[in-house]
Amino acid sequence: MATHPLLTRLGIDLPIIQGPMSGGGSTPELAAAVTNAGGMGSLGMAYLTPDQIVAAIRKTRTLTSGPFGVNLFAGAWQSAKAVDPEPMLEVMAHAHAALGMPPPTIPQLPADPFPAQLEAVLQERPAAFSFTFGVPDADSMALLRQAGIAIIGTATTLREGRLLAEADVDAIVAQGTEAGGHRGTFAGAFDVSMVPTLRLVEQLREGPPVIAAGGLMDGADIRAAIDRGAAAAALGTAFLVTPEAGIPDAHKQALQSAKRDTTVITRAFSGRPARGLYNEFIAMLDGRAARILPYPLQNALTRAMRTEAGKQGKAGYLSLWAGKGVARSRPMAAGDLVRTLAEEMRRVH
């Protein structure tokens, strides 16, 4: 099989990319293991400070000499709080009590962290920079190009793909409805952006190279995406059950215990739509969606709960992000998973 030019641009042998998972899933160990096995690892850095981003990139470089990517949230930040937080605080008080925590308070939101985070990325110059929730401004894109960093945007619709093409990205992640974690929708209503992964790949393939993402769990899935026009595939949920992934053990156990797809799209944890396993906290907000605060305020409000739940091993209060293929998760070392995926791709072809 001929190597796609995008793989050459990224410096990788296999069309396998470990999806960036902000909030702890991504670790230097995971990114390096995937890269060392011939794919491309990724670091989800949206919640880190510039100093933490620099430290994580440098640690990854001690573990691999190969290419890896860094991901940030380029949009959706709202500092204004023109909402009444009391109804949501009432819900959170019950969740905190269940975990033995003091009552919640409304956190103070800092300014949009993206500009300073991007400066750290430009300083360290990883092989690739990917983003979601929007498109960086023209000046930021120009600086990334000048640094020689491959630029990868996220689209959930054809319209978003066209906007990314106009911004001159090197590749587009086609985030299908099956994808776990946050929806990257930024140009239009969320509820009309739920396009299945393979269909979205077909819609976007006439533009920049496409990286399929959403519900892809094995080599046959990757091969199907490539047959539809994708240059590569990004897998997130498949890598969450590896020992190198940084999510709490309770999250990993919930993924491995899933015998079928019980994922739902919820705004409960962050204020933005995201796909994860249905659990107690989501149930607490069933029929009460109007109480949920906008992103990033809701995300900041639930952070202490999620942190404590991880320490206590209580999956009911964790954001159990997962894609629709969760029941096919296979716990194994990340490098072994990449090699298994590659062998499965060869067998299918």
Image: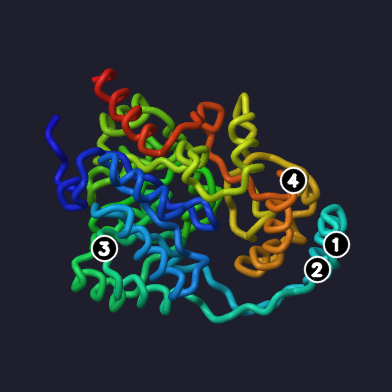
Q: Mark 2 vs mark 3: give the one in front.
A: 2
Crowding at mark 2 (Cα within 10 Å: few <14, some 14-19, many 20+): many
Residue 261 percent across, percent down from the top left = 60, 30
- Residue 176 to residue 187: above or below: above
Q: Residue at x 42, y 68 (%)?
A: 53
Residue 154 percent across, percent down from the top left = 38, 54
Residue type at mark 1?
A: Ala
**Whether label 1 touches label 2, CB < 8 Å:** yes
Residue type at mark 3?
A: Glu
Can you name the residue that lies furthest to the left here? 2
**Whether label 1 touches label 3, CB < 8 Å:** no
**Which residue carries the number 2 mark?**
104
Residue 251 percent across, percent down from the top left = 63, 43
Whichever of callouts 1 and 3 sits on the residue coming sooner in the sequence is: 1
**Which residue carries the number 3 mark?**
166
- Left or right for 238, reference 301: left
**Whether label 4 touches label 2, CB < 8 Å:** no
Residue type at mark 2?
A: Pro
Q: Secondary structure at mark 2?
A: loop
Identify the mark at residue 93; answer none if there is no mark: 1
Q: Mark 4 vs mark 1: give the one in front.
A: 4
Res. 94 in view: yes
Q: Nearer the viewer, residue 316 or 65?
A: 65
Crowding at mark 4 (Cα within 10 Å: few <14, some 14-19, many 20+): some
**Which residue carries the number 4 mark?**
314
- Left or right for 228, reference 258: left
Whichever of callouts 1 and 2 sits on the residue coming sooner in the sequence is: 1
**Whether label 2 touches label 3, CB < 8 Å:** no
Q: Secondary structure at mark 4?
A: loop
Q: How many numbered markers are drawn?
A: 4
Q: Residue at x 33, y 54 (%)?
A: 63
